[in-house]
Image: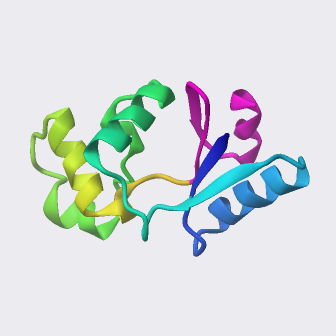
């Protein structure tokens, strides 16, 4: 089952949902600001994305700039920062089996279908 980690207030995230709907695909919407990631779930998604944890962080967010920007953090500490502050997570994330993509641009969803 395809999953999309979605923030309804984000236009790119809404575009991702619409893209999957327009394709007629079945998928699960996970509103990650409400149904928050555990550290293990986030690690699994990062592994499927094949990126380093810092690459999933929205480093322009005030939370990051004020609390983390000047610190030397391990991957686990970065993951913990995202778990505690889910607004830091880039979106939308689309996961299909063992692959995942941050759907920016939206068409990148094709890479996991």
| Residue at the image position 29 percent from the left and 54 percent from the top | 82
Q: 9 or 2: which is nearer to us?
A: 2
Q: Does residue 96 show up magenta in the picture?
A: yes
Image height of 45 relative to 86, above or below: above
- The picture quadrant where one finds residue 46 is top left
- Left or right? Give the position of 25 relative to 92: right
Percent position of residue 6, x then y: 57, 60
- The picture quadrant where one finds residue 16 is bottom right
| Residue at the image position 15 percent from the left and 62 percent from the top | 67
- The picture quadrant where one finds residue 29 is bottom right
Percent position of residue 44, x then y: 39, 33
Q: How many marks?
A: 0
- Left or right? Give the position of 92 relative to 109: left
Residue 95 visible, this angle:
yes
Which residue is at the far left?
Answer: 71
Q: 63 or 26: which is nearer to us?
A: 26
User: Magenta segment, which residues?
Assistant: 92-113
Percent position of residue 112, x then y: 69, 30
| Residue at the image position 20 percent from the left and 49 percent from the top | 80
Q: On the rendered image, what quadrant is the N terminus found in?
A: top right
Percent position of residue 100, x then y: 57, 33
Residue 60 visible, this angle:
no
Image height of 9 relative to 63, above or below: below
| Residue at the image position 36 percent from the left and 53 percent from the top | 37
């Amino acid at each position: 089952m395809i999953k999309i980690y979605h923030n309804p207030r984000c236009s790119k995230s809404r575009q991702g949902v619409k893209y999957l709907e327009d394709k007629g695909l079945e998928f699960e919407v996970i509103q990650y600001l409400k149904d928050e990631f555990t550290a293990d779930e986030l690690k699994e998604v990062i592994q499927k994305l094949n990126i380093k944890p810092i690459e999933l962080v929205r480093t322009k967010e005030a939370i990051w700039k004020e609390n983390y920007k000047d610190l030397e953090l391990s991957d686990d500490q970065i993951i913990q920062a995202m778990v505690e502050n889910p607004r830091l997570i880039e979106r939308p994330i689309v996961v299909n089996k063992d692959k995942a993509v941050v759907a920016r641009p939206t068409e990148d969803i094709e890479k996991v279908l």
